[in-house]
């Protein structure tokens, strides 16, 4: 929300990147409530770009089969697959290809989230 962003900017002295990290670490309670839900339904879509030189196979999950069967959800999945194919910033296909420094930075951010810090060390 806007007020969360305002507070994050105030906490970080107006630095946008620091405010983004603040918001990520805070975890936002709304997202935390949904984090425990299981998204076991969904669709698998494919997109093959013209010329068949590039393709995307993507799984998009949701909570109910009612949503998964909906035309809007299927269209969302197809649009996302096309956007992934069009995005020049997609550089990782497998988890083994992730830059270790980037992975370590993301893990450090995750470990500083309020909901994670509240858990015992062996669960973190």
Image: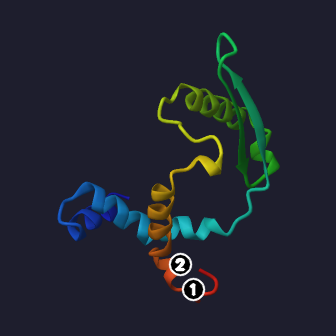
Q: Secondary structure at mark 2?
A: helix
Q: Which is more toward the observer, 96 or 31?
A: 96
Label number found at residue 43: none
Q: Which is more toward the observer, 112 or 92?
A: 92
Which quarter of the picture shows residue 67? top right
Q: Which is more toward the observer, 100 or 28?
A: 100
- The residue shown at (67%, 35%) is 77
Label number found at residue 116: 2
Q: Secondary structure at mark 1?
A: loop
Residue 2: % across, % down: 32, 57
Badge 1 density bin: few <14, some 14–19, many ≥20, Cα 10 Å: few
The correct choice, above or below, for 124 with respect to 97 in the image is below
Badge 2 density bin: few <14, some 14–19, many ≥20, Cα 10 Å: some
The correct choice, above or below, for 17 with respect to 81 in the image is below
Query: For mark 1, what is the residue?
Result: 119
How far apart marks 2 and 1 lie (CA) works out to 5 Å
Residue 65: % across, % down: 82, 48
- The residue shown at (74%, 62%) is 38
Q: Determine contact: label 2, label 1, CB under 8 Å.
A: yes
Q: Quadrant of the N terminus?
A: bottom left
Q: Which is more toward the observer, 85 or 115?
A: 85
- The residue shown at (50%, 66%) is 107
Give the left or right position of residue 97, taking residue 67 as reference: left
Which residue extends farthest top?
Answer: 51
Work out whether residue 101 can be spotted: yes
Q: Quadrant of the C terminus?
A: bottom right
Work out whether residue 27 can be spotted: no
Residue 55: % across, % down: 68, 25
Give the left or right position of residue 1, taking residue 111 as reference: left
Which quarter of the picture shows residue 122? bottom right
Residue 49: % across, % down: 65, 17
């Amino acid at each position: 929300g806007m007020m969360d962003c305002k507070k994050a900017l105030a906490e970080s002295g107006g630095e946008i990147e620091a405010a983004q990290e603040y918001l990520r670490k805070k975890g936002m309670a709304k997202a935390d409530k949904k984090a425990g839900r299981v998204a076991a339904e969904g669709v698998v879509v494919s997109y093959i770009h013209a010329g068949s030189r590039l393709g995307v196979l993507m799984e998009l999950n949701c909570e109910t089969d009612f949503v998964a069967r909906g035309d809007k959800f299927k269209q969302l999945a197809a649009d996302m697959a096309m956007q992934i194919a069009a995005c020049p910033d997609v550089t990782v296909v497998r988890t083994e290809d992730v830059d270790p420094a980037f992975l370590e930075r993301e893990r450090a951010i995750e470990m500083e989230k309020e909901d994670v810090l509240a858990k015992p060390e062996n669960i973190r």
